[in-house]
Amino acid sequence: MLTIDGSTGEGGGQILRTTLSLSLITQTPVRITSIRKGRARPGLMRQHLTSVQAAAQVGRAEVSGAALGSQEVVFRPTAIVAGEHTFRVGSAGSTTLVLQTVLPALLRAPAPSTLTLEGGTHNPMAPPFDFLDLAYLPLVRRMGPEITATLVTPGFYPAGGGLARVSIAPVPALAPLELLSRGELRGRRAVATVANLPSAVALRELDAAAAVLGWEPACFRPSVLRGGHGPGNVITIVVESEHVTEVFTGFGERGVRAESVGAKAAEEARDYLAAGVPVGEHLADQLLLPIALAGRGAFRTVRPSSHTTTHLQLLRDLLGIRASVEPISEGAWHIEIGR
Amino acid sequence: MTRKSTVVLGMLGPTLDTGKTPERWSRWRPSVALCQHEDLIVDRFELLYQRRFDALAGTVMGDVRHASPETDIRGHVVEVDDPWDFEAVYGALHDFARAYPFAPDREDYLIHITTGTHVAQICLFLLTESRYFPGRLIQTSPPKRDRTELAAGSFTIIDLDLSKYDRIASRFQKEQREGVSFLKSGIDTRNAGYNRLIERIEHVAIASRAPILLMGPTGAGKSQLARKIYDLKKGRRQVSGDFVDLNCATIRGDGAMSSLFGHTKGSFTGALKDRPGLLRKAHEGVLFLDEIGELGADEQAMLLRAIEEKAFLPVGSDREVRSEFQLLAGTNRDLSQEVAAGRFREDLLARINLWTFRLPGLRERVEDIEPNLDYELDASARLLGVRITMSRDARERFLRFSTSREALWPGNFRDLNAAVTRMATLAPGGRIGPPIVEEEIARLSEAWRPAPAAGGAGGGEDGEDLVLAALGARRAAALDPFDRAQLAEVLRVLKGARSLSEAGRVLFAASRAKKKSVNDADRLRKYLARFEIEWSEVAGGG
């Protein structure tokens, strides 16, 4: 059995989720130790437990140590169960993190799957649905599998209560991915969504974003939702290029001015455009695993985060891949993965 | 490893949990927030509410299911007309607790006390503290303003089992050690059995208001201990009344009833004014009845009633008087023997010997003579107002004698106290040297020398041997010379008699001459029973 020290690198929930994903794909039992060691509340928190349980469901796994506060989990998958799965996630967690954990295994499963995800879809602590749908999944599709994701109802933190459906048509092997340039800029837009909140909030965010980005007014659009659960607010800035689409997100929070939410997301988008690379910080992190599964690939991105380096190290250890991370110019890095 | 399910029991908060519009999700609602924590999963939530808050309960339950799919939330209507009426709320919650199928071996219960009226919170606390709710309290708080916390806020689990807290437990241990030390008058006793006994007495004295029976030979320290128990309870604010003590051997006849239970003016000749009686004086305090075996039959009956009903009739009164007191009783007799002999009420004994402690005599704890010697020296010093010291060889000599077989200590600690008082008083300049000790040893040896049997034609030594044979040296030593001489003569006669009746005819010759028929044998058998001696054990062969 493989033992992974859960406290290495960034040492949080990500190392747990990636390990579970890889254990599912390789059908290798793993023991994850020192989970979230040294944190104020060490061990598994509820959102981590949700991922463990989802992985156990998909992997028909035998699990020990799956309890709140547990710092060691032993996970023994016995299969990859394709087909219909429903995951109900409490408002404190995020459905996208659950999807992230189980998706890689289902990409290469023997049969198609349909996932129903209930709970939070827009949570400041997790990748928002729009990012997965617009930035991440198109690149995964480019590697072979057919995936469609539909947001039926958004679920904003803290009420949650969203609903999303994901269907996956797997392929036996993923094709390599190379993403070295953005290509020509095709479109750009900023959408500020408010649910059960005054539309002025959205307009203020958009004004602030416009001031940073200087795009023409037609690029900025408010979206006002009524009904559903709870209040929610998110600004999503989308940059569509020939080879890649990137998404930048800002979450409205109690006590934070709408202007600063809008400006902060816009600054990220502006910096991405200035860096001239195709892949932003969060997308870089997401792409590593599918490329490692494909066995080969490369992309250019901004300065790698600690999440990214932790992730790469884990992939080296678990899949035996080689990876190089090289700066190529001011603010641009080249990441290459091979056998 | 199977995890216990976490079950929350809580009241719906008509104020804090309220909200109908989507905006409610921006507010902190304790019952919903409780199910939104990252480090707490509520498997089941039993939500108690009044019927008039039906709609709100529905919203809250829906929101909990929504925010926490892991939680099975169930509503329970608990009807209370006035949620600020302590009695009504307590009753309703008590009913709920009694009816609820708690399974603490499989489930962990958390009692949510953040919602509901203050009265409801107090009731939940009391019911948890008394284990009707076999769980821990959980208190929730809204997120702090600095937003370092998520929307769920924070929670604190409070276990009312105070022994689970190290610092509190050590406080209690310290308090208990102080209590034990206090009961021992600060004497650092070494006898393990005695130390265990006092620890147990401390525990019972603090935890119980039931009668306590202290057994043990004369001078073993029953009265002092009773007084100390009272002082300890008073110090812990468990009693507010007085300590009232009485040696039952000192009251006899008509006066006995009256001194215990009081009388009304004119109830008998000489009753010139009302007398409250000792039981009434002990109201809300402690009544210590030493030598309780000496109490007459009428007094026993009245005392039993006073203990059971906390009420009794003063002599000459037709109005009952109430008095609540804790009874401590002392005896140097075996009360079950007294019951067997028909001299003590069985029901009264049953009532007072719930907690029976037998204090050992001094000879059973010779290792404690030294610390008691120091204590008595200090006590004498305080009494005499001079510093009393004992030279090293004097001390060694005294201890060697005190712990030897020759030292009988029939009066136990009373004897030790007397010996030290004498030595301290006689010590020149407060310094006890070997001559003073030698003089005291001679005095004690003389006092403890077996008394010659009274009267009788010869055979005195004979009778004394018989006493030792029948009782053993220790019990024989505990006898007063008065009883010892009498018993020696009785045993001497029995030895020479063929039956109890024959011995009775000799021993009760004078009274036989005056009366027509006397059951001498029975009288003799009862006499022997007082010493736990059977006729068959001492019968002569002849």
Image (spheres, coloured by chain):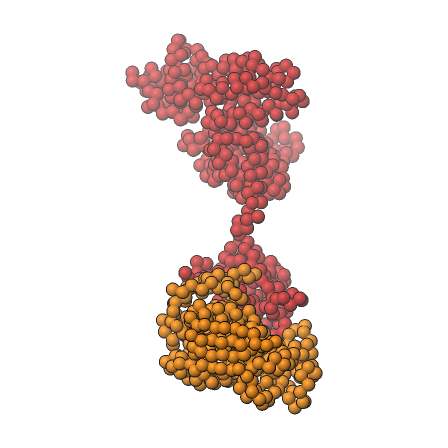
Chain colours: A orange, B red
In the image, residue B291 above or below residue B3: above
Q: Is residue B49 visible?
A: no
- B541 or A86, which is in the foreground? A86
Give the residue drawn at x 42%, y 70%.
A320
Outermost residue, top side: B458
Please tell me in which quadrant of the rendered image residue B508 appears: top left
- B38 or A80, which is in the foreground? A80
- Estimate the x, y position of residue A57 in percent, counting from the top left: 41, 73
Give the residue drawn at x 61%, y 66%.
B149
- Estimate the x, y position of residue B470 in percent, counting from the top left: 38, 21
Q: Is residue B134 visible?
A: yes
**For the C terminus of chain B, which image quadrant?**
top left
- Estimate the x, y position of residue A183 in percent, counting from the top left: 56, 87
Give the residue drawn at x 63%, y 79%.
A271
- B148 or B221, which is in the foreground? B148
In the image, residue B135 above or below residue A232: above
In the image, residue B204 above or below residue A75: above
Q: How many marks?
A: 0
- B329 or A204, which is in the foreground? A204
Is A308 on the left or on the right of A199, as rendered? left
- Estimate the x, y position of residue A80 in percent, counting from the top left: 38, 75
